[in-house]
């Protein structure tokens, strides 16, 4: 099946690109990869909206927050699907892989459509997003050691948490958790406060960090995490010091959802974390293929997919 444009990915960046092109009357298709290929991450903004709806002066339960978060997310997805349908965009769901430089195959055997389809496009947009980096020496268990995808899998929020990683995502999640009344300590091997200041580009985040009384431990590498029970975890640092809390949230980076796309057949290069190499216009090594969102190895300024 031939089309002008194929957008691969179930992310906000992919949806925005598809709608922008559809509104110009162009012929395009959208592919929503399987969850294994594109582990969709619910935005922290939805978490904040859900928490604001639940504020009652008491402790917010994980089960209640999860329920409202999913309701908001599903409502937004419903709006997105309706928009795509209104503009006549063909939507496919299934495992996707490149066959060559301008063709992809979608395996829909696990969906209602139930068959394979090959799409050949003039241009293709990669919008698969990223997933949390999971160092092998951290014992993730969805209870006391979690990442941003599994945060709401915890049975309950503890009274204290350690956030490993003081990048922008780590700081945003740390401030959110602190806003729930959780005692938060941020641990990072960065050399000092200057690095933190460079990461703080959001004025509200600066205000939150000051007002929420978050603690920081800099210049010490996390070499391990011990989770001895379902109620606590201990972070071991290179200096020999240890910090304990009810749980640990690991935010040490992201890796691209690209490992099963067979990008070699498309002539698209990725960095050591699976993020796509692009020029300043979002164009990959293959001038027919572009990338948008955090799957880009470095932030592209524009996307010429029209």
Image: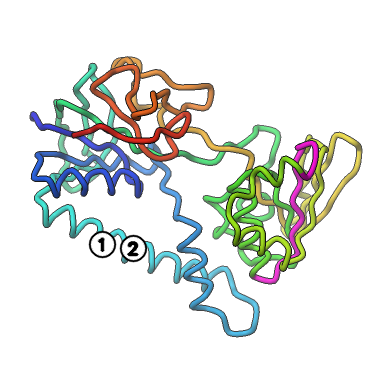
Residue 118 falls within the magenta-colored stretch? no
Q: State the SS at label 2.
A: helix
Label 1 environment density (alpha carbons within 10 Å; few <14, some 14–19, many ≥20):
few
284 sits to left or right of 243: left
Q: Quadrant of residue 285?
A: top left
Query: Which residue is depicted at the point 42% across and 35% down?
Result: 295
Q: Which mark is residue 78?
A: 1
Which residue is at 78% across, 45% downward?
A: 193
Q: Nearer the viewer, residue 210 or 42?
A: 210
The image quadrant that residue 6 belongs to is top left
Q: Local crowd at mark 2 within 10 Å, few (<14), some, or many (≥20)?
A: few
Secondary-structure class at tag 1: helix
Residue 27, how many percent across, how many down?
Answer: 9, 39
Q: How many marks?
A: 2
Q: Which residues are magenta?
A: 180-193
Task: State the quadrant of the N terminus.
Answer: top left
Residue 56, position in %: x, y? 58, 84
Q: Residue furthest bottom?
A: 56
Q: CA distance from mark 2 to mark 1?
A: 6 Å
Q: Residue at x 64, y 45 (%)?
A: 199
188 in the magenta segment? yes
In the drawing, does residue 231 fall left or right of residue 208? Answer: right
Image height check: is 131 above or below 245?
A: above
Residue that appears at 38% across and 68% down: 71
The disc label shown at residue 184, or none? none
Compared with 156, 282 (above or below) is above
Disc 2, disc 1: CB below 8 Å? Answer: yes
Q: Quadrant of the C terminus?
A: top left
Q: Which mark is residue 74?
A: 2
Looking at the picture, how far across and down is residue 47, in whole percent?
50, 64
């Amino acid at each position: 099946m031939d089309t002008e444009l194929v957008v691969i990915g179930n992310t906000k960046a992919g949806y925005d690109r598809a709608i922008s092109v559809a509104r110009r009357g162009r012929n395009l298709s959208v592919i929503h990869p399987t969850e294994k290929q594109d582990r969709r991450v619910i935005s922290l903004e939805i978490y904040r909206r859900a928490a604001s709806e639940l504020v009652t002066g008491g402790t917010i339960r994980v089960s209640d927050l999860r329920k409202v978060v999913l309701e908001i997310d599903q409502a937004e997805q419903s709006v997105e699907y309706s928009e795509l349908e209104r503009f006549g965009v063909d939507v496919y769901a299934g495992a996707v892989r490149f066959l060559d430089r301008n063709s992809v195959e979608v395996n829909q055997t696990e969906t209602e459509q139930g068959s394979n389809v090959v799409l050949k496009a003039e241009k293709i947009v990669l919008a698969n997003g990223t997933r949390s980096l999971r160092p092998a020496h951290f014992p993730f268990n969805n209870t006391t050691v979690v990442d941003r995808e599994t945060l709401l899998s915890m049975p309950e929020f503890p009274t204290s948490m350690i956030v490993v990683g003081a990048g922008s995502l780590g700081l945003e999640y740390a401030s959110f958790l602190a806003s729930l009344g959780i005692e938060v300590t941020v641990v990072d091997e960065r050399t000092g406060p200057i690095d933190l200041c460079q990461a703080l580009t959001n004025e509200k985040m600066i205000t939150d960090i000051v007002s929420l009384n978050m603690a920081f431990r800099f210049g010490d590498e996390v070499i391990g995490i011990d989770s001895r029970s379902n109620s606590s975890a201990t972070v071991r640092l290179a200096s020999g010091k240890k910090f304990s809390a009810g749980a640990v949230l690991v935010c040490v980076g992201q890796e691209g959802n690209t490992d099963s796309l067979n990008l070699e057949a498309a002539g698209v290069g990725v960095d050591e974390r699976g993020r796509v190499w692009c020029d300043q216009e979002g164009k990959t090594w293959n001038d027919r293929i572009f990338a948008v969102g955090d799957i880009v190895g470095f932030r592209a300024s524009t996307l010429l997919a029209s």
